[in-house]
Amino acid sequence: MDGNGRWATARGLPRIKGHKAGVALVEEIVETAANEGIKHLSLYAFSTENWRRPDYEVSIIMSLLRLYLRLFTNSLRRRGIRFHFLGDLESMPEGIKVDALALEAATANEKEMVFHLAVNYGSRMELVAAVQSCIKDGLKAEDVDESAIEGRLLTKGVPDVDLLIRTSGELRISNFLLWQCAYAEFYFADCHWPEFNCGQFRKALESFATRERRFGGVQEQNYKG
């Protein structure tokens, strides 16, 4: 979800206006994903590196996040969508922690789709924590295999990424789901996140549907929504 600040700057607006526009788009994208039959949607909203931004900008982003967590319970439940906070929740401000846990609890029984919101997330942090967990659990070196790592990731039980979309013309992963994206297809959109509407989203899905995916020479059928 990249380019909120640049979108605002290009229009002579304060960067915070871009963040507000980006948040407003989230509901549309989540709704579109549910309509397209997608079972897991992950949005990368705030990385562990984003704490380096100016304090006032971080404060406003956190306020917007808390507002979102409080407002969208009904819309998620209406569509049968379960919410999952993807990131280091323990080190988040207490109010956000409370609201995130409340939203997870309120949507825990929903089955149509899972919406993973990545906040205070970094893939390297996640992988280090998984290895540390293996050591704390007393695993021997020969017992640390892929399943041992996967079972200790924040995405435990979630399928690997099929399609990774990056907005704003950036051509990098930026420390997002490095393990889970091992065989992901990539789609790079030139538009900034606030411009990435449902039409742009469907365009990315259509591109994915035309690709022939192979895992070690084994072909897999793509999304056909």
Image: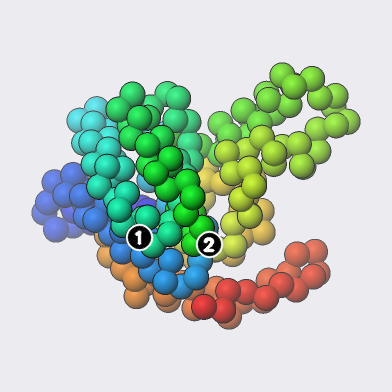
Q: Which mark is residue 78?
A: 1
**Front-lying residue, 27 or 118:** 27
Does residue 180 appear left or right of residue 145 in this picture?
left
In x, y percent, where is residue 161? 59, 57
In x, y percent, where is residue 72? 29, 50
Q: Earlier in the sequence, mark 1 or mark 2?
A: 2
Disc 1 residue type (three-letter): Arg
- Element at label 2: loop
Disc 2 residue type (three-letter): Lys
Q: Is residue 58 visible?
A: yes
Q: Dot 1 surroundings within 10 Å: few (below 14), some, or many (20 or more)?
A: few
Identify which residue is drawn at 48% across, 36% down: 87
Mark 1, mark 2: which one is toward the viewer? 1
Does residue 181 appear left or right of residue 215 in this picture?
left
Q: Disc 2 designates what residue?
A: 39
Alpha-carbon span between mark 1 and mark 2: 16 Å
**Front-lying residue, 151 or 146:** 151
In the rendered image, the residue lying farthest to the front is: 109
Q: Is residue 191 visible?
A: no
Does residue 15 appear left or right of residue 222 in this picture?
left
**Front-lying residue, 67 or 178:** 67
* Quarter of the figure with residue 140: top right
